[in-house]
Image: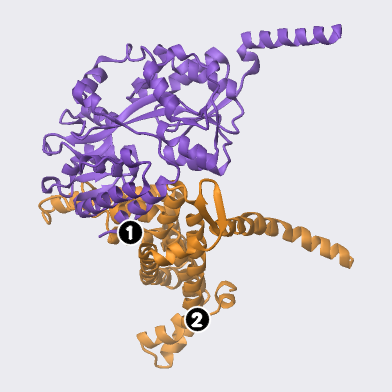
Amino acid sequence: MNASGKRLTLILLMAPLLIWLVALIVIPHMEILYVSLREKVGVREYEFGFANYMVFFNEPLYWNTFMRTAVMSILATALTLLIGFPVSYYIAKLTRGRSKTILFLLCLIPFWVSELVRTYGWMILLRESGLVSGFLQYIGLASEPIEFLYNDAAIMVGLVYTSMLFMVVPLVTTLDSLDDSMIEAAYDLGGGGVSVWREIVIPHAMPGIVSGCIIVFMLSLGNYLTPILLGGKDSLWFTGLIYSQFITRFNWELGAAFGMLLLVLSSTIVWAGLKLSGQTLTRTVGR
Amino acid sequence: MLKTKLMSGLAGLAAGALLLAPAAEADTLRLLTWGGYAPENLIEKFEAETGHTVEVTLSNNEEMIAKLRATDGGGFDLAQPSQDRIAGAQAEFGIYKPIDLSKLDAALFIPSMLEATKANTTYDGKVYGVPHVWGTSGLVVNTAEASGVKDYVDLCSDDVAGKVSYRLKRPTLIGFAFSMGLDPFAAYGDEDAYKEILSKVEEKLISCKPNVKTYWTGGDEITNLLRSGEVVAAMAWDTGGWKLNAENSDITFVAPTSGALGWIDTFALPKRGRADEAAYAWINFVMKPENAALVTESAGNFTASKGGDADVNAELKARYQKSFPQEAIDNIKWYPPVPAGLEAFEGSVLDRVNAAN
């Protein structure tokens, strides 16, 4: 094949990806950026300006909501990691063959139904007239119905549950690639349980931990359904603000500015996380 | 010359023949409407009668406007926003086209309602909406447990703490303003006065927040909360209360002492709708009394069709009369057209209430 033929092949192979990126990611974001820089001055009258961005920084409500969303997402990520790591370790290292497949499948099965259905499942469990409250009354631990829904803890439960799979999959993959003989060697050389974990297992799993954390953090930050449905009256979430600006307030300009800010601020947090953990994007995602 | 005349005569004849046989130019009517406004049996009857087919998309006021704005008035042939939300949306976004009243049979409508809707949906001298279904929002109360709730502000009393629900939307702001003795509709035209009213309502809603179980967002959600007894008093639509009343006679709709809020959902033509003929045919079809009765049966609300309440079942009528004695009807506050841009202040109030602790 000659040089121009090779180039044509490359272009053709790249075309679907490029079309995808340009048509669905780049162009809509340019449009959103453009809308966010339009300042509304009257009926059907717009001017170029940064007023929409200033609203975010001047109104403490929006700023606080973003902080709350970010902090809760970080917390959800940490909890998911805490619960997900032992599970992944068990699946990757302590089981073999069929039981491994079955355990992995068990983590996967909840994701065969839509997020909405899973969230409603939690609502059935947690509501005042729900299963948990009913069970507690049945065994005599509670004398009257208890409301578990509509608070931050319920949001947290929902977020951790929703994103568990996205933590477990990268962790299982990286832990799988850790040769058992390395752990045995560490014990042979006199390492204790804690030092083996600290020196061998966690450093090896680090890329998996970081990529899992990035995915879970982004999913939580951008989640809309779970915080709104489980949080009820206290469900202040940044994506909910964007939705209400676009749909119920007809204020696309402010909504677009919030959207751009979410993109920039969440990217900053991920970048800061990578710096703090001493990882790079190429090392974690590239593996 | 003679030939052209002959040709145009023939064309006219052909067009006349087509009008006589509407099935020959069957269209698909893409209807953007509320739940219950286009029941299956009504659609089947319409399709059999005219040959047009109907595709229904369910929505609400805000989503209708947002959808039509996103497509610049395309994607649908007939929409059903509330009468107060048309002129402002038209001024801001230009998403509708004027209605050709000569294509509608005005005799099918209740005259006073038709005139009022026409007046409220007029923008730049043209009419953009005709009435279809009307109803009210007020209080749905479980009278066995919350008999003290007579007005919106009673939702904030200690007797019902933690067992109350309302929406975080503009009707809540308006309802609370009225029950606090203010008149938000009179202040629609005066931005400063309206903002002052809103700031009082904001204070009230924030102090009332601990009483609220959750802010409901959909009709099914509030029905479930009331049915399970988790909520005993809520701000909701009349039909929701009547439907629950059929299951549990303790729960019913109560017109608040400060007045129920009256809405009229209309027919409006999206700007880039493609099947106008089918849309006009649908309006004329559903406004016939026997068809209007089918809508009332499925939606639970009465229509602007003259004589449309005659065939409605007696139970629904009885519930309606119990909730609405004559003085409560006279006290209904009908929404005037929302001026363009008002939603922006209301939005920031609602955001602050949502964020308050």
Q: Nearer the viewer, residue B107 or B65?
A: B107
Position of residue A175 measured from the top left corner of the image (x, y, whole percent): 48, 74
The N terminus of chain A: image quadrant: bottom right
Provide the residue designation for mark 1. Answer: A155
Amino acid type assigned to the residue bearing label 1 in the image: Ile
Which chain is in purple here? Answer: B
Q: Which residue is mark 2?
A: A275
Classify mark 1: helix, strand or loop: helix
Does the image show residue A74? yes
Q: Can residue A99 be seen in the rendering of this structure?
A: no
- Height in image: B163 above or below B321? below
Q: CA distance from mark 1 to mark 2?
A: 28 Å
Q: Residue furthest right?
A: A2
Quick check: A255 left or right of A6?
left
Q: Which mark is residue B58?
A: none
Q: Residue A120 appears at what percent x and percent y?
A: 34, 48
Mark 2, Cα crowd under 10 Å, few <14 / some 14-19 / many 20+, is few
Residue A276 spot, x, y in % from top left: 46, 82
